[in-house]
Amino acid sequence: MARAVISTIGDDRPGIVNELTKVVLELNISVEDSRMTVLGGEFAVLMSVTGSEAALTELEIKLKEFCQTTGLVHLFHLTKDRDVTKHAIPYLVTVIAMDHPGIVHNIAAFFSSQEINIRDLKTETQRAPHTGTPIFNLSLTVEIPAGVKVNELRREFEEFCAERDLDGELVAGS
């Protein structure tokens, strides 16, 4: 089985997921992993798909045609399975704070400086009840390598968050 990652983005409207997955299904390709969401007024799709090499070649052609007729923009990239030979433990990280520029960068820099991989990251800004203050929510999954002292890392992360007025937590999980 071959693997590809596809991404599409365009004006949000009902039916996009149905239409896109129909193209995939008609080629007997499996959607193995996906993220689909509305960002601003755009609907964004990120999918990892598997199928025969011939089917993925055909998908690249059909996806281009589909996007031309629907006004979506797309990317298509052949890839391979992820190397999971490294032993790492997944941990969940959550951060809540009053919204301001740099939160994602600062969190990414913290984990990068520790040589800890970010596997998944999601952010969302909401308005606080009564005041309307923008509240920033971040959740991510990091992969902590074997040998890292988690209690020490947790303490450093808590200090890092306290210095930046972030409410952050690092807990075991997947």
Image: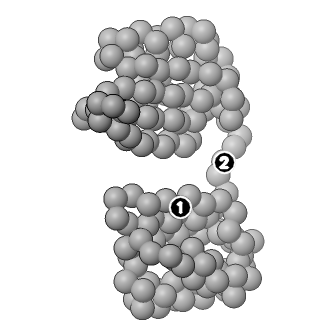
Q: Which circle marks residue 83 in the picture? A: 2
The residue that appears at 38% across and 20% down in the rendered structure is 166
Residue 88 seen from this side? no
* Position in image of residue 78 (x %, y %): 56, 70
Q: 56 and 124: which one is in front?
A: 124
Colouring convention used in this rendered image of the protein: one colour
* Position in image of residue 69 (x %, y %): 42, 91
Judged from this view, the residue extending furthest toward the left is 101
Secondary structure beneath dot 1 equals strand
Secondary structure beneath dot 2 equals loop
Q: Amino acid type of disc 2?
A: Asp
Q: Is residue 41 left or right of residue 169?
A: left
Which quarter of the rendering shows the N terminus? bottom right
Q: 124 and 82: which one is in front?
A: 124
The residue that appears at 37% across and 11% down in the rendered structure is 162
* Position in image of residue 85 (x %, y %): 71, 40
Q: Which circle marks residue 36 in the picture? A: 1
| Among the 4 quarters of the image, the one containing residue 133 | top left
The residue that appears at 69% across and 43% down in the rendered structure is 84
| Among the 4 quarters of the image, the one containing residue 73 | bottom left
* Position in image of residue 163 (x %, y %): 32, 11
In the rendered image of this protein, does residue 133 appear above or below residue 170? below
Q: Which circle marks residue 168 in the picture? A: none
Q: Which is closer to the viewer, label 1 or label 2?
A: 1
Residue 83 seen from this side? yes
- Badge count: 2
Which quarter of the rendering shows the C terminus? top right
Q: Earlier in the sequence, mark 1 or mark 2?
A: 1
Q: Amino acid type of disc 1?
A: Met
